[in-house]
Image (cartoon, rainbow, N blue to C red):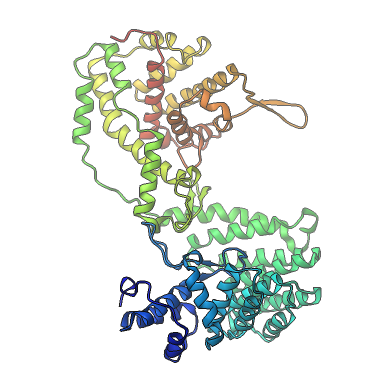
């Protein structure tokens, strides 16, 4: 039977009593939900089927034990907005039915769920609902096989007890007894037990018991060279040691955690698997104050790890392979060559500078949103971006596809950058370079020509004309290596000058009173930057010149980090072309 066929069939207590013996015992609510759904589909009577569907919805919800206001969430959320049941779906009639069957329910998992739902939705009216939920949540067995769902039930019981000011000792003492008898043969069972007590109010002695037991298990794993497990346990021990506010113990556990990360990195079968462990080790050891780093030779260990990270990244690059996609650019090339053919010199330059319409920032944003929806698995985990020299230059977070984050610019930015880079490579290769070759085949571009253009450009200050001319001219010589090194600083100067002209402070003063100019990256982050650059041009400059995720030409050039190949690449040619475009399109010269 389907839900539609059930309709609004009456919910009767005697019907629930008649079927309760057919409810097979399950481990947790998810299994009950599946079982109820099958029974509903097989039912012949609408009154019985509706009860089964209702119980399936009740048991399908995911428990979030630490939430006071939204302890249950839908088990499934589909891309089109459809979802499984939530608390607010239950009608007054259905809630009254839950209250009616609660005393007759014999299964502790379902009884705990009904009582908790009633308490959450009728809070303050009947405190007995919370007490019934606590009593039945405690019946979940705390074993290795059940801890992954029983732990949530026990933690929910603790929160409910705290909410109604009921003592929690009978709950916490039971868990502490389990903690005391754990060993390293239990794998992560101890950690799952300890997680239950995160929200509990424990005495100092109880916290010491937990911390000591975690440290003992961590040490045992370390001696057995199970470094992944030892790292996890040392981290948990550190977390609980901080509750004791014992600085000496915290420093000791910081060292043990960091050193365990380091040992785990060394133990990896492939070097490229070690980088994340080295980074975690470094971040952990740096939390130890300088004055406490003399013990265990921590200074030397930090120095060794700092050396290992770029080496590991470099090896990671060697494992990577370039994936190439064939794109037929014949029509694009023909269009570019034809566009700049058989025209006067200056008109050709104008056509060349406006060869194509640049997609907008909004276009790349929409493209990124579509990409995330089409390929969600690519965004479920974060990413690490490694430069050619082995440096980690950026990290991108994972995206929670259940949240409405795909409209957020910062979330979309990494995907937007990647799509923009693909666009840059294609544009330069299929449009800019072929058109440039055709232009040079028909015309000789001199410095005098460029001087005439630059002196009439509102973009170019009088005192910078020579620099702009030289930068643009080297591009026509196909020497983009020199061109971008001359032009990128001029772009930065233009941005700074425009901001200053609008009264924006472009400097910073250090503690000794020394005033220095902000770099391009900081200038592009100024709130007033939108007064100077359009939204689309700002996005281009960020990706091309200032962002580590992008090409970062400005910073790489300034710090000597760009290789010759990068400075003579298609993206470099695009930067040169964009500079020419800006100069020509902000000009009083008659190109016709």
Q: Residue 277, percent across and down? A: 57, 62
Task: Specify the quadrant of the image occupied by residue 579.
Answer: top left
Name the quadrant containing residue 360: top left
Of the pair 248 and 401, the residue shown nearer to us = 401
| Left or right of 37 on screen, residue 404 | right
| Point 50% across, 69% down: residue | 92
Q: Position of residue 461 (x, y in %)?
A: 51, 12
Name the foreground residue: 364 vs 395. 364
Q: Quadrant of the N terminus?
A: bottom left
Figure check: 453 above or below 93: above
Residue at 25%, 28% (x, y): give it.
434
Residue 149 position (above or below residue 308): below
Query: On the rendered structure, is 334 left or right of 423?
Result: left
Write the residue at 64% across / 83% down.
Answer: 135
Image quadrant of residue 215?
bottom right
Q: Say how many tags the image has.
A: 0
**Residue 110 in view here:** no
**Percent of width and height locating residue 40:** 36, 80
Q: Position of residue 408 (x, y in %)?
A: 48, 45
Q: Can I make out residue 319 in this image?
A: yes
């Amino acid at each position: 039977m389907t839900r539609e066929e059930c309709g609004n069939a009456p919910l009767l207590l005697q019907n629930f009593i008649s079927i309760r013996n057919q409810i097979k015992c399950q481990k947790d609510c998810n299994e009950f939900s599946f079982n109820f759904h099958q029974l509903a589909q097989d039912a012949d009577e609408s009154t019985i089927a509706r009860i089964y569907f209702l119980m399936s919805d009740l048991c399908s919800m995911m428990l979030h034990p630490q939430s006071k206001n939204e302890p249950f969430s839908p088990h499934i959320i589909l891309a089109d907005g459809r979802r499984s049941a939530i608390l607010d779906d239950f009608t007054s009639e259905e809630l009254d039915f839950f209250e009616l069957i609660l005393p007759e329910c014999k299964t502790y998992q379902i009884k705990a769920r009904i009582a908790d739902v009633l308490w959450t939705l009728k809070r303050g009216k009947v405190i007995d609902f919370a007490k019934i939920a606590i009593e039945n949540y405690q019946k979940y067995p705390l074993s290795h096989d059940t801890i992954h769902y029983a732990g949530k039930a026990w933690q929910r019981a603790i929160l409910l007890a705290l909410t109604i000011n009921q003592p929690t000792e009978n709950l916490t003492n039971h868990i502490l007894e389990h903690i005391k008898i754990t060993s390293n043969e239990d794998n992560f069972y101890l950690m799952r037990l300890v997680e239950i007590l995160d929200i509990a109010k424990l005495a100092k002695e109880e916290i010491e018991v937990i911390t000591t037991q975690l440290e003992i298990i961590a040490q045992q794993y370390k001696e057995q060279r199970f470094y992944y497990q030892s790292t996890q346990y040392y981290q948990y021990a550190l977390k609980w040691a901080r509750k004791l506010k014992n600085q000496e113990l915290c420093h000791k556990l910081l060292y043990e955690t960091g050193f365990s990360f380091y040992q785990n990195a060394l133990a990896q079968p492939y070097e490229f698997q070690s980088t994340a462990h080295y980074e975690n080790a470094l971040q952990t050891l740096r939390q130890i104050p300088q004055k406490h780093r003399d013990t265990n030779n921590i200074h030397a260990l930090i120095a060794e790890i700092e050396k290992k990270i770029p080496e590991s990244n470099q090896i990671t690059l060697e494992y990577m392979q370039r994936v190439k996609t064939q794109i037929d650019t014949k029509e694009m090339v023909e269009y570019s060559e034809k566009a700049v053919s058989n025209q006067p010199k200056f008109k050709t330059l104008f056509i060349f500078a406006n060869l194509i319409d640049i997609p907008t920032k909004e276009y790349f944003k929409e493209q990124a949103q579509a990409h995330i929806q089409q390929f969600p698995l690519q965004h479920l985990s974060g990413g690490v971006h490694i430069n050619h020299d082995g440096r980690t230059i950026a990290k991108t977070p994972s995206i929670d596809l259940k949240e409405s984050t795909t409209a957020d610019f910062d979330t979309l930015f990494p995907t937007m950058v990647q799509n923009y880079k693909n666009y840059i490579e294609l544009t330069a290769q299929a449009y800019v370079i072929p058109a440039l070759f055709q232009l040079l085949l028909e015309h000789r571009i001199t410095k005098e020509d460029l001087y005439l253009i630059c002196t009439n450009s509102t973009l170019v200050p009088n005192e910078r004309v020579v620099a702009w001319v030289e930068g643009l001219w080297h591009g026509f010589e196909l020497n983009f290596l020199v061109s971008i090194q001359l032009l990128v600083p001029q772009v930065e100067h233009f941005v700074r000058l425009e901001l200053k002209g609008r009264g924006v402070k472009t400097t910073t003063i250090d503690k000794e009173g020394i005033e220095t100019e902000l770099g391009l990256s900081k200038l592009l982050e100024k709130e007033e930057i939108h007064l100077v650059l359009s939204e689309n041009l700002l996005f281009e400059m960020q990706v091309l010149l200032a962002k580590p995720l992008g090409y970062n030409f400005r910073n790489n050039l300034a710090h000597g980090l760009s290789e010759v190949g990068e400075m003579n690449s298609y993206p470099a040619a695009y930067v040169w072309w964009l500079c020419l475009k800006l100069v020509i399109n902000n000009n009083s010269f008659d190109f016709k």
